Image (cartoon, helix red, strand yellow):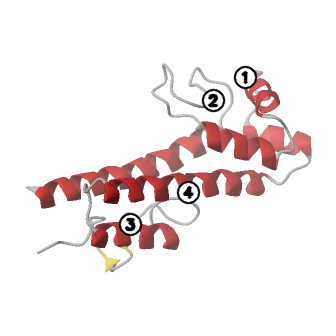
């Protein structure tokens, strides 16, 4: 039973990262929507976290209020970057770094709470370091840190 819970939690953590990366890409690539820009709200919290918004604002040499206002006015994040004379890839990298930090904190908390094993935490962290759990170059499906697989954590005896 504990093994099944560990696998479920691991799968949910992976899904969280994947959906976060996909959500960020969607938010960054499109124009105005009714989805909140950050934090949790009626849109299910699919926007940028407060920390990610702060990182993006810092990369753009703006305050979070200025960035929020620009995004709420209908500008896409890429347009804001262009207007600020900042390479959009730098903004994306800042957001990705925050998301990786948040994911590492979630993995550490799950390990501390006994929800996952050390082996599972190591597997998730290895995948995160290799880019298999989101970010540029991969979402973790089909190949994991241990080679070809089904995206599942290593089996525990």
- Per the image, label 4 sits on a secondary structure element best described as helix
In space, the residues marked 4 and 1 are separated at their CA atoms by: 26 Å
**Against 25, is 137 above or below?**
below
- Residue drawn at the location 21% of the way across and 58% of the way down: 6
- What residue sits right under mark 4 in the picture? 101
- Per the image, label 2 sits on a secondary structure element best described as loop
Q: Nearer the viewer, residue 62 or 136?
A: 62
Discs 1, 2 touching: Cβ within 8 Å: yes
Who comes first in sequence, dot 2 or dot 4? 2
Discs 4, 1 touching: Cβ within 8 Å: no
Discs 1, 3 touching: Cβ within 8 Å: no
Q: Nearer the viewer, residue 49 or 91?
A: 49
Who comes first in sequence, dot 1 or dot 2? 2
Numbered tag placed on residue 124 in the rendering:
3
Mark 3: give few (<14), some (14-19) or many (20+) Cα within 10 Å: many
Mark 2: give few (<14), some (14-19) or many (20+) Cα within 10 Å: many
Q: Nearer the viewer, residue 1 or 42?
A: 1
- What residue sits right under mark 2 in the picture? 37
Numbered tag placed on residue 72 in the rendering:
1
Say which quarter of the image contains residue 37. top right
């Amino acid at each position: 039973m504990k093994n099944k819970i560990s696998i479920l939690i691991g799968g949910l953590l992976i899904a969280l990262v994947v959906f976060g990366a996909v959500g960020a890409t969607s938010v960054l690539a499109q124009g105005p929507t009714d989805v909140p820009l950050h934090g949790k709200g009626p849109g299910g919290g699919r926007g940028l976290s407060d920390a990610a918004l702060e990182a993006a604002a810092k990369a753009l040499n703006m305050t979070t209020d200025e960035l929020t206002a620009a995004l709420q006015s209908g500008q896409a994040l890429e347009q804001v970057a262009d207007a600020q004379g900042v390479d959009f890839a730098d903004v994306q990298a800042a957001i990705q770094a925050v998301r990786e930090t948040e994911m590492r904190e979630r993995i550490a908390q799950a390990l501390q709470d006994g929800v996952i094993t050390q082996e599972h935490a190591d597997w998730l962290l290895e995948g995160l370091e290799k880019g298999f759990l989101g970010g540029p170059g991969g979402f973790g499906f089909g190949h994991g840190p241990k080679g070809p697989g089904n995206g599942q954590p290593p089996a525990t005896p």
